[in-house]
């Protein structure tokens, strides 16, 4: 589905860099970890997107930068026309009410000495909702929206009294209680049993559609995104190497790294159990000392000496509205 992105853009990242200083012996500067290293994208109002890549590719650092928890080293984040880095303390507080966050580890994300009612009321108190009845109504509505019903039976429970799936539903309810226009979900099902993962993903997708939210879903698992996201951004070495609408990218992957990720997905057919997966060897690059040129070239079976190992590839458009940062598309 092609849409006019300029009219519907909610959040935009422009040449975004987030580097972390390395120190040796606690005080000597020893370079930087280039966690996010030159990222550009625009998220449309009301769409679901997925950021996909191996652990250590910069996905979570990107999420925390978009949330305002890390300040960009260079570049900018623009939300509803305003520049995130220009916000003062009050403006940043308002921004964080507009962008909800669903963490990876639900138990670690919930204060163990607060009951569910207090956990969900706290954001409302912090953001100035003074009327107690209003807070209670919004807390109950959030619990019902995440299918924790009847709400009254959960209000007095503590996190350790809930299952992992119930804990993650409380985390989602906390992200929703301030009525944000965007949710960032960082590996929201990776800590859950397989039996409840699909339920949580369907819940997030249904809430996103019903509320008209923008949802940024961060995952290392390409197999989960076809029925969940509308667009995919594939990250490697702190950069976006491929982006397209979901069916286009999964059916016609253009970058060798995306092809490798898809080849690594286990085949549930037992007749194919012995099939060799064409997965490149090696490890993801060190973000403290990334290789020159294309960051995938040390692992790429199609790397061209004197080009891929020297020059950083720009974004090519090998298919309509499908971008791939690879010299094979020259």
Image: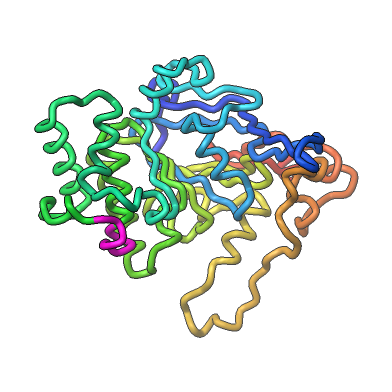
Front one among 321 and 20: 20
Q: Identify the image quadrant of the N terminus.
A: top left
Q: Is residue 5 magenta?
A: no
Identify the image's colour scheme: rainbow, by chain, secondary structure or one colour: rainbow
- In the image, residue 101 sits, relative to residue 131, either above or below, namely below
Residue found 81% across the figure and 45% down from its top: 291
- In the image, residue 193 sits, relative to residue 54, either above or below, namely below
Q: Position of residue 209 (x, y in %)?
A: 27, 42
Q: Residue furthest right?
A: 306
Figure label count: 0
Residue found 60% across the figure and 55% down from its top: 54
- Horizontally, is 224 left or right of 64 in the view? left
The magenta-colored residue range is 158-166
Q: Quadrant of residue 178?
A: top left
Q: What secondary structure do most residues of the magenta stretch adopt?
A: helix
- Horizontally, is 312 left or right of 1 in the view? right
């Amino acid at each position: 589905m092609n849409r006019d992105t300029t009219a519907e853009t909610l959040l935009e990242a422009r040449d975004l860099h987030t580097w972390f200083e390395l120190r040796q012996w606690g005080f000597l500067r020893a370079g930087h970890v280039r966690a996010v290293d030159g990222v550009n994208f625009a998220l449309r109002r009301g769409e679901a997107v997925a950021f996909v890549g191996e652990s250590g590719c910069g996905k979570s650092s990107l999420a925390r930068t978009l949330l305002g928890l890390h300040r960009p080293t260079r570049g900018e984040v623009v939300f509803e026309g305003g520049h995130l880095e220009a916000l003062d303390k009050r403006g940043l507080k308002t921004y964080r009410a507009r962008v909800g966050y669903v963490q990876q580890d639900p138990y670690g994300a919930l204060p163990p000495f607060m009951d569910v009612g207090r956990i969900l009321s706290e954001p409302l108190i912090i953001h100035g909702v003074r009327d107690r009845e209003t807070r209670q109504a919004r807390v109950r509505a959030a619990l019902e929206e995440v299918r924790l019903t009847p709400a009254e039976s959960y209000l007095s429970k503590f996190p350790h009294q809930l299952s992992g799936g119930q804990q993650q539903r409380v985390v989602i309810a906390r992200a929703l209680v301030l009525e944000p226009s965007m949710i960032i979900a960082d590996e929201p099902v990776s800590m859950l049993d397989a039996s409840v993962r699909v339920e949580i993903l369907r819940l997030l997708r249904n809430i996103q559609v019903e509320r008209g939210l923008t949802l940024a879903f961060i995952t290392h698992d390409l197999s989960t995104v076809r029925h969940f996201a509308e667009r995919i951004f594939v990250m490697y070495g702190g950069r976006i190497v491929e982006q397209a609408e979901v069916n286009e990218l999964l059916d016609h992957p253009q970058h060798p790294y995306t092809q490798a990720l898809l080849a690594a997905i286990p085949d549930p057919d037992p007749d194919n159990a012995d099939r060799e997966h064409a997965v490149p060897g090696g490890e993801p690059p060190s973000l403290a000392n990334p290789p020159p040129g294309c960051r995938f070239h040390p692992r790429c079976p199609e790397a061209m000496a004197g080009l891929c190992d020297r020059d950083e590839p720009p974004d090519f458009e090998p298919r309509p509205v499908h971008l791939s940062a690879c010299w094979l598309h020259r």
